[in-house]
Amino acid sequence: MEIDGKIILDLGMQSGVSKAGNQWKKKEWVLETFGQYPRKVKFHVFGDKADTIGIEVGNSYTLSVDLESREFNERWYTDVSCYAARPYVPGGMPPQGSYPQQPGYPQPYGQQPYAPQQPYAPQQPYAPQQQYAPGPQAQPTAAPEPFGGNAFPPAPTPDGYDTDSTDDLPF
């Protein structure tokens, strides 16, 4: 998820030792969102990124964040954890090269080289294949016409009898 806004407060660095004996540190800021009804959002950066993320009070950023809620003593708490920050550009992505690629994350949208696709070319309409007579010197022959050269079968007579027939059977 991404949040755009201006950093209004630096809450400083916190550090300590976990129950397992591991060192930890996090840095917290407050961001005020843009819009008609601005919101204040407290977020943190955890671990080694806290030293290198480069967020400054007074500047505007687009933050990539993860949200997570947890319950403790029948109360719920929500953490906003930031994993990437880039300078805010109104209305779109910053120009290419305006912020460094962060290791472990894909190249931001809009900074990948664009290669246009080939234009659409319709296929040729279907043309029936010629038939060939077998033999050493096969010559093309025309396809046989159904019903003796007429595309339609002979029409029945009004009384239902075939007048060209020599027998007297109606079928």
Image (cartoon, helix red, strand yellow):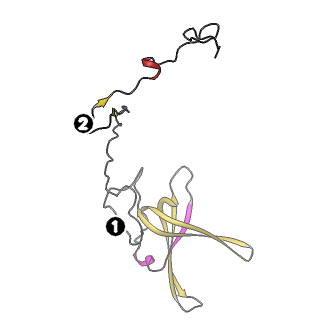
Taking the view exactly as shown, the residue that stands out farthest to the front is 167
- 90 part of magenta stretch: no
Q: Quadrant of residue 18?
A: bottom right
Q: Are there few (<14), some (14-19), or many (20+) residues within 10 Å of tag 2?
A: few
Image mark for residue 137: 2
State which quarter of the image contains the C terminus: top right
For the residues bearing labels 2 and 1, Cβ distance under 8 angstroms: no
Q: Element under label 1?
A: loop
* Image coords of residue 10 (percent x, y): 48, 71
Q: Which residue is at the front of the view, 160 or 59?
A: 160
From what the image shows, is residue 160 above or below residue 38? above
* Image coords of residue 85 (percent x, y): 43, 66
Q: Are there few (<14), some (14-19), or many (20+) residues within 10 Å of tag 1?
A: few
**Magenta segment, which residues?**
40-52
Residue for badge 1: 100
Q: Quadrant of residue 121?
A: top left
Q: Nearer the viewer, mark 2 or mark 1?
A: 2
Residue type of the residue flagged with mark 1 = Pro
Q: Element under label 2?
A: loop
Residue type of the residue flagged with mark 2 = Gln
